[in-house]
Image (cartoon, rainbow, N blue to C red):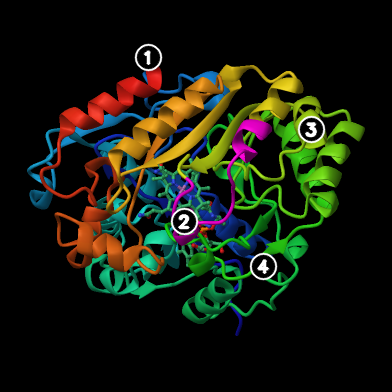
Amino acid sequence: MEKHDPHILLINPWIHDFAAYDFWAKPIGVLAIASILRMHGYQVSYIDCLDRFHPELSHTGKTGRFGKGHYLKSRIQKPEKLYDVPRNYSRYGIPASLVRKAIKERPRPEVVLVTSLMTYWYPGVIALIEIVRETLPEVPVVLGGIYATLCYDHAVNNAGADFVQCGESEAAVIELVGRLTGFAAEQRAFADDPDTYPYPAFDLQSNITYVPILTGRGCPFRCAYCASSFLNPTLRRRSPRHVVEEIAYWHKKYSVQDFAFYDDALLIDANRHIIPILEGVLARGLDVRFHTPNALHIRPLSRDMARLLFRAGFKTIRLGLETASFNDRKAMDSKVGPGEFQQAVDHLKGADFKGEAIGAYLLHGLPGQDLAELETSIKMVKSCGVRPILTQYSPIPHTALWPEAVKSSRYDLDSDPIFHNNSIFPCQKEPFSWKKVGYFMRLTRG
Ligand code: B12
């Protein structure tokens, strides 16, 4: 006999790191899975270990600009292998006692699904799974997400889950959870038609201060430092209408004003994608604000595009410059050429964006990076009147740059994802200097 409405518990684990901040960072992957399960007839509940608005924590809940904000944090011991890093290490998120309590208060699940994000955050995943094991000893635990995909063997051997699921999982999870619960649901959502996917279940959060929007999956570029093509091998997009409907839905039903685009290639094939999306937002008269923490490609930023972004309500523009040096750039990426950055900035400013709204990401800590080149890049960005933002390089398995990263690291990168942490500048060879890091940070500001 078929069982009805099995209950599935989904959990977003803690972050263990030297620093963490909610700058439009929500676990859209696990909320997409929650939503797919709901669509297929499952009961779901959710525990967000990174909840900034937990009702039992009176001191949390302050919302920063545009919905961002601090997580609660408690100092913990540094992982042994990072003893040489002169910084404090913390667990970000709600106390373990509240996680235990939440697990006990939820209906007993038939399966627990745990997500993972940055590879070097796996200690928070392990700590969370230990608690699940202790409180729900007989319930199967499935781990998925970005760490699980990029470091599959490590996850299988260390995370303590019963199953580790790789890659995009909307279809796989219906199959796997169906097998574990004996609940037969016919697939109703299809990877090659993302319009069949329901909106991620942000309504399961205790508060929605902003909503991440993913208008598609994948990226046509193959940048040497990025794992996008491994995680999402093909570019598949939602229809503009479907995206506009989603923005209108969160805005009208939950009064959400701030939206952060998570796409890797938002502006690509603009005539058929972002232009109709933004024209749709304008036609619907939606008074919303947009942010691009994952960076925009510079080349498509024409005068008309800049004007449209401004009119549609973009407030935070981040540009993926990475370096202002164009010698040997081809080995790294081919997304921007000389002169294009300055031109894009001119168009943005011409469209009335103020310099403070525009930031250019520059990679710091690439294998063999010439630091004189970084200094020149910072100065060039500043001379254009926009903010240089250093993004510390995180070496990632399955990327073209990984073998070189392993060779150039002062750590044994291959042995443990803990060394992928960008805050430790793992690919800067000895003599590595924290003083120099401070110097570059100050240079971006002054
Ligand atoms: C959006 C994004 C961000 C957002 C925030 C993301 C967040 N949720 O917190 C922003 C812009 C803030 C960000 C910041 C950074 N990011 Co980022 N980011 C991404 C990006 C582009 C998309 C991730 C995403 O949301 N995907 C969409 C969802 C739907 O997919 P998903 O999470 O994979 O979920 C699917 C599956 O994994 C699975 N799944 C997920 N959970 C579960 C659970 C179960 C049980 C199951 C079965 C399945 C499952 O099903 C889901 C649906 O198919 C990825 C690249 C990419 N293409 O994936 C990089 C990526 C994750 N980021 C990366 C990096 C390096 C960074 C930064 C360090 C950059 C920097 N130097 O500053 C910072 C650090 C962030 C921090 N310290 O807080 C790296 C990862 C590095 C690593 N070592 O792990 C990636 C892979 C990009 C790259 N360079 O290759 N990022």
Residue farthest along the bottom direction in this orientation: 1
Looking at this view, is 85 or 363 the one in front?
A: 363
Horizontally, residue 50 falls left or right of residue 316, namely left
> Callout 4, which amino acid?
His
Q: Which residues are magenta?
A: 326-344
Whichever of labels 1 and 2 marks the residue nearer the N terminus, that label is: 2
Circle 1 or circle 2, nearest the eye:
1
Locate residue 275, reporting x and y percent.
83, 44
Q: Is residue 371 above or below residue 336?
A: above
Residue 339 colored in magenta in the image: yes
Locate residue 74, reporting x and y percent.
22, 31
Between the C-alphas of marks 3 and 4, the distance is 45 Å
Between the C-alphas of marks 4 and 1, the distance is 54 Å
Between the C-alphas of marks 1 and 3, the distance is 30 Å
- Badge 2 is on which residue? 10
- Badge 4 is on which residue? 40
Whichever of labels 4 and 1 marks the residue nearer the N terminus, that label is: 4
> Callout 2, which amino acid?
Leu
Q: What SS does tag 4 mark?
A: loop
Q: What SS does tag 2 mark?
A: strand
- In the image, which disc is placed on residue 446? 1
Looking at this view, is 39 or 195 the one in front?
A: 195
Are the residues flagged by discs 4 and 2 in contact, CB closer than 8 Å? no
- In the image, which disc is placed on residue 171? none
Are the residues flagged by discs 1 and 2 in contact, CB closer than 8 Å? no
Residue that appears at 56% across and 23% down: 384
Q: What SS does tag 1 mark?
A: loop
Q: Is mark 2 within 8 Å of ligand 1?
A: yes
- Badge 3 is on which residue? 303
> Callout 1, which amino acid?
Gly
Whichever of labels 4 and 2 marks the residue nearer the N terminus, that label is: 2
